[in-house]
Amino acid sequence: MIVLDIAAPILLMMGLERTSSANASLLNNFEIVATSLIAFLAFKEVLSRRLALAVALVTLTSVILGFEGRSSFQFNTGSLFVLGAACCWGLENNCTRMLSEKSSVQITTIKGIFSGLGSLIVALLLGEGLPAPVWIAAVLLLGFVAYGLSINFYIKAQKDLGAAKTSAYYSIAPFLGVVFGMVFLGERPAAQFYIGLAVMILATVLIVRDTITLQHTHEHIHTHCHEYAHGALIHTHGNLADHEHQHSAALV
């Protein structure tokens, strides 16, 4: 996980040097597809039709948001680096899923410290200098929220949802970024944002319904005890939402 977290940002930066930002933004969303495919093929994670459709809609949304005319997509060597970064993050997401039963705080701490140190060592070897202390403090504060808390919650979600579904939920993040830009910076998104928002809402509904269906199925596979009351049979299921069913027929 640490090696992948070091490699992915470096590959992304190499890609940005060789391709446009719009192209990189579009291709970087392949992380969602990579996460889902790796979870399904390598880690045997269940990928229902509803979730597969949601992932496809998320990919379509990425195309809509990243499209800025014919010049916004140009497949070149930079595109390969960006796709490499997306695949690294996709594999890393699945590796994190395998450890999600462990302490999310410990995992986040280890990933943050060693991945950060690894990237810092690579930067120093390439001759880059340290920024001013004020920028270091600002980046540490931003990293605590945008990386530390974010990854901690992400790992907690993976414990119950799995890598593919968590990654699909995480795709809502760009829309929140646009909303924050509208509120705090006075930015106004282009028309394709609202088109993409409509598609993303549909994808989110599919993901939520798939989550509820899966949880409902699991909750009812439990043993139950029997009690007798005035000749009728009452049994209580020991699932997450305890409830009782009364049968008029006697137990044979």
Image: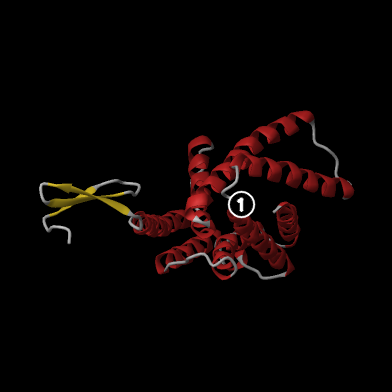
Q: Residue at x 60, y 56 (%)?
A: 98
List x then y, in percent, for residue 77: 74, 68
Q: Residue at x 62, y 66 (%)?
A: 71
Q: Residue at x 55, y 47 (%)?
A: 154
> Of all residues shown, which one is farthest toward the front?
252
Q: Is residue 207 left or right of residue 43?
A: left
Q: Residue at x 68, y 40 (%)?
A: 109
Residue 148 vertical placement versus 63 (above, below): above
List x then y, in percent, for residue 228: 17, 48
Q: Amino acid at mark 1?
A: Leu
When asked about the image quadrant of residue 163, the answer is bottom right
Q: Is residue 234 left or right of residue 74?
A: left
Query: What is the count of numbered marks?
Result: 1
When asked about the image quadrant of residue 113, the answer is top right
Of residues 152 and 224, the one nearer the viewer is 224
Image quadrant in which the N terminus is located: bottom right
Residue with the mark numbered 1? 99
List x then y, in percent, for residue 223: 34, 55
Q: Residues within 10 Å of mark 1 (few under 14, many from 20)?
A: some
Coloring scheme of the render?
secondary structure
Q: Secondary structure at mark 1?
A: loop
List x then y, in percent, for residue 234: 19, 50
